[in-house]
Image: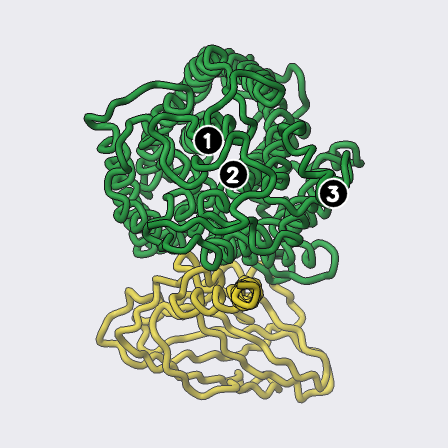
Chain colours: A green, B yellow
């Protein structure tokens, strides 16, 4: 971004230019930019898959895909959106913002930071390349359940390796973030004075360090079951496929908070800025984030109520899951209380943040419905679940990413984005998103199963509504692409503070933020 | 600062490796939990548990074997007595030998003491169902598979099962097994 602005610095320090600059860079801003562009490209890749899925589901029967290719699409859409879009985008924010917010010159381990990013495209190639291999890409679902996942072809091995690589990338990134936050804060910036974005990322990074290795272990067991004759999950050899679900969800429930805690952080930066009030209940926000993270380790089996477990276990997982609604409720209350009697203005970042608060809460409530074990047994693997997790991941995680991009893009590029186009992007996204996913609640309640390319005739109308919404939502993301590219190229000059109500160290820097910042640490009183 | 970072890095790498190991440690942990709590033990599921056994009382079974004096066979039970619960599936064995020098066809006829126990003695498989042909000098072990009906009178504490083998000569009665389903 803003190459002209850096050009002087680059030559001054004898840095390589062109492709080599990006391949060898150890600058946290460059790496943040790389992460964000990677996520942007992958958003369009995995989004196109979603549009193919929705096009197929426009009518009952098979029109565009065969069932096997449809399963490949749902699997790859899930894997790429999680590991290729949401997680890299949050890593991009962390790389750009954590050093700027802490007054640190860079991340703690710049060379490792470079590696953490550059292994990601390799994983992306392994995943995407498998579409052209015999048998096609993985079709066993993003959850990788055996026995299906120990029976597939070569692409299943490649996917397992890709998951290993993406896990390694996240672990390296997380170690960097934890070390930076713990050791490199500006003098006077105590932990409890840190911007909430840093807090949520610190806790997220700990979650990643604790759970990604467990996923690595689980997929390693899949790999040895497939290729080296072990029987961890192969029932024919005395293994237990249900055990995979337990190990997987021990990772993957914390993972869903990994996908949402940084979103909480971004929204907690944006709302106070545009309400022109400090964040309400800062300390309770920190404790709520930590509580959510700790509780996330003891609720995993609510993803698998239907595998059969004793009533006592069902009750435990049901009530512990519901308990998570308490700290989450504290957060929603605090955001609303921050806006209460604030001098609010509604620029695009604020619109996305408010939509986040409203729509994420809907997703949270449908999650609460699914937490009820007897209800979940009825709704398991229906479109109700699809509606639930898209409300928390699209209008939750993705909308917070949009909010963050609009919020910090002027600081990063030195240019204001086009507010009119931003508002178009927001309104089309928020309307389109609800047209896609709201009818899915009804489809699920009526019993339409997920991951099936065909459906019974009575589901047709709601599916057609969802497909129309999907195309509105999907194509309105092109507006986002245009806004971002236009802002990088030029636009009205952004002031240093950018937003009237913005607080924090990053806003004391010039816009665009120079290539090297805080080489002498600022002092925070 | 750099020393501090290296220390933090070392700690976090240890945590990472520890959690990788923890993923594998979950495997024995999972099986131990299943074993201790008794969930997921497919062989002992309640569906296949025999609920027909009356474990509140014991019945002593005595086994007796005789041959008709005209039959040159030696015949004995391999166990004299057994303590069982009504409803249990029981298998016992008898041994019979032809001590003559020619093949003989014999058939066993059971009797019960007390006689009212007879209708509760449910045989599933018995050598008495069919005629037995023994070659000269042949010895054979033969099973009886049966269930004592839990409906049997509570005051019956001992049941005697007695067989007597008769010579039925060369006349092979294939249908006789059906006429003697409970002896």
**Badge 1 vs badge 2, beta-carbon distance below 8 Å:** yes
Q: Residue at x 33, y 41 (%)?
A: A371
Chain at tag 2: A
Q: Residue at x 68, y 55 (%)?
A: A223
Q: Position of residue A490 (x, y in %)?
A: 59, 18
Q: Is residue A459 visible?
A: no
Under circle 1, the secondary element is helix
Marks 3 and 1 belong to one chain: yes
**Badge 3 vs badge 2, beta-carbon distance below 8 Å:** no
Quick check: B159 left or right of A414?
A: left
Chain at tag 3: A
The CA distance from mark 1 to mark 2 is: 8 Å
Quarter of the view holding residue A8 = top right
Q: Residue at x 41, y 42 (%)?
A: A197
Quick check: A191 left or right of A29?
A: left
Residue A107, above or below A137: below
Of labels 3 and 1, earlier in sequence is 3
**Badge 3 vs badge 1, beta-carbon distance below 8 Å:** no
Residue A489, above or below B148: above
- Residue assigned mark 1: A404
Of labels 3 and 2, earlier in sequence is 3
**Figure quadrant of the N terminus of chain A:** top right
Q: Which mark, by number, is residue A15?
A: 3
Q: Which mark, by number, is residue A93?
A: 2
| Residue extending furthest toward the left | A341
Under circle 2, the secondary element is helix
Quick check: A367 left or right of A125?
A: left
Under circle 3, the secondary element is loop
Of labels 1 and 2, earlier in sequence is 2
Q: Nearer the viewer, residue A171 or A190?
A: A190
Q: Residues within 10 Å of mark 3 (few under 14, many from 20)?
A: some
Q: Nearer the viewer, residue A295 or B72?
A: A295
């Amino acid at each position: 971004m803003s190459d002209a602005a850096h050009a002087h610095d680059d030559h001054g320090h004898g840095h390589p230019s062109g492709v080599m600059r990006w391949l060898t860079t150890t600058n946290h801003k460059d790496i943040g930019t790389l992460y964000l562009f990677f996520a942007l490209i992958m958003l369009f890749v995995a989004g196109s898959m979603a549009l193919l899925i929705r096009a197929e589901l426009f009518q009952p029967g098979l029109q565009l895909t065969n069932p096997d290719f449809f399963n490949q699409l749902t699997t790859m859409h899930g894997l790429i959106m999680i590991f290729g879009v949401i997680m890299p985008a949050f890593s991009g924010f962390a790389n750009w913002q954590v050093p700027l917010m802490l007054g640190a010159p860079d991340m703690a381990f710049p060379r490792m930071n470079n590696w953490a990013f550059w292994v990601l495209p390799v994983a992306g190639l392994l995943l995407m390349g498998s579409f052209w291999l015999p048998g096609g890409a993985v079709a066993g679902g993003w959850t990788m359940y055996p026995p299906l996942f120990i029976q597939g072809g070569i692409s299943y091995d490649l996917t397992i390796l890709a998951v290993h690589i993406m896990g390694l990338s996240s672990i390296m990134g997380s170690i960097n973030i934890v070390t930076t936050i713990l050791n490199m804060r500006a003098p006077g910036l105590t932990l409890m004075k840190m911007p909430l974005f840093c807090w949520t990322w610190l806790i997220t990074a700990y979650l990643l360090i604790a759970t990604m290795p467990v996923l690595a272990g689980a997929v390693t067991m899949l790999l040895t079951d497939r290729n080296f004759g072990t029987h961890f999950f192969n029932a024919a050899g005395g293994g237990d496929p249900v055990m995979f679900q337990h190990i997987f969800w021990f990772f993957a429930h914390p993972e869903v908070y990994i996908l949402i805690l940084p979103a909480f952080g971004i929204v907690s930066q944006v709302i106070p800025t545009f309400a022109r009030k400090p964040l309400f209940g800062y300390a309770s926000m920190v404790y709520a984030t930590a509580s959510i993270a700790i509780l996330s380790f003891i609720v995993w089996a609510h993803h698998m109520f239907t595998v059969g477990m004793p009533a006592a276990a069902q009750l435990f997982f049901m009530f512990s899951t519901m308990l998570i609604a308490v700290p989450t409720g504290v957060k929603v209350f605090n955001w609303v209380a921050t806006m209460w009697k604030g001098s609010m203005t509604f620029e695009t970042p604020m619109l996305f943040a408010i939509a986040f608060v409203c729509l994420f809460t809907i997703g949270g409530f449908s999650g609460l419905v699914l937490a009820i074990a007897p209800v979940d047994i009825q709704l398991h693997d229906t479109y109700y679940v699809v509606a639930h997790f898209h409300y928390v991941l699209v209008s939750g995680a993705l909308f917070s990413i949009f909010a963050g991009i609009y919020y910090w893009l002027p600081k990063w590029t030195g240019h204001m984005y086009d507010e009119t186009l931003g508002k178009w992007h927001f309104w089309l996204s928020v309307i389109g998103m609800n047209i896609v996913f709201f009818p899915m609640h009804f489809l699920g309640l009526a019993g339409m199963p997920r991951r099936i390319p065909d459906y019974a005739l009575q589901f047709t109308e709601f599916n057609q509504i969802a497909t129309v919404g999907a195309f509105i939502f999907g194509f309105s993301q092109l507006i986002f692409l245009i806004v971002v590219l236009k802002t990088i190229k030029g636009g009205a000059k952004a002031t240093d503070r950018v937003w009237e109500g913005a607080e924090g160290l990053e806003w004391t820097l010039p816009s665009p933020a120079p290539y090297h910042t805080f080489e002498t640490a600022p002092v925070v009183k | 600062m750099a020393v501090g970072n290296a220390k933090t890095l070392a700690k976090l790498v240890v945590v990472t490796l520890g959690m990788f190991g923890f993923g594998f440690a979950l495997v024995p942990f999972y099986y131990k939990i299943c074993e201790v709590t008794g969930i997921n033990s497919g062989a002992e599921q309640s569906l296949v548990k025999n609920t027909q056994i009356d474990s509140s009382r014991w019945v002593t079974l005595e086994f007796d074997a005789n041959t008709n004096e005209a039959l040159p066979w030696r015949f004995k039970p391999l166990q004299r007595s057994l303590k069982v619960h009504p409803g249990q599936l029981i298998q016992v064995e008898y041994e019979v030998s032809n001590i003559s020098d020619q093949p003989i066809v014999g058939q066993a006829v059971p009797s019960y003491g007390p006689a009212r126990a007879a209708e509760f003695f449910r045989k599933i498989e018995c050598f008495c169902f069919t005629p037995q042909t023994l070659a000269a000098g042949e010895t054979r072990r033969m099973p009886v598979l049966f269930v004592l009906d839990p409906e049997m009178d509570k005051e019956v504490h001992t049941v005697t099962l007695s067989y007597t083998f008769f010579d039925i000569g060369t006349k092979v009665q294939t249908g006789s097994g059906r006429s003697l389903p409970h002896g």
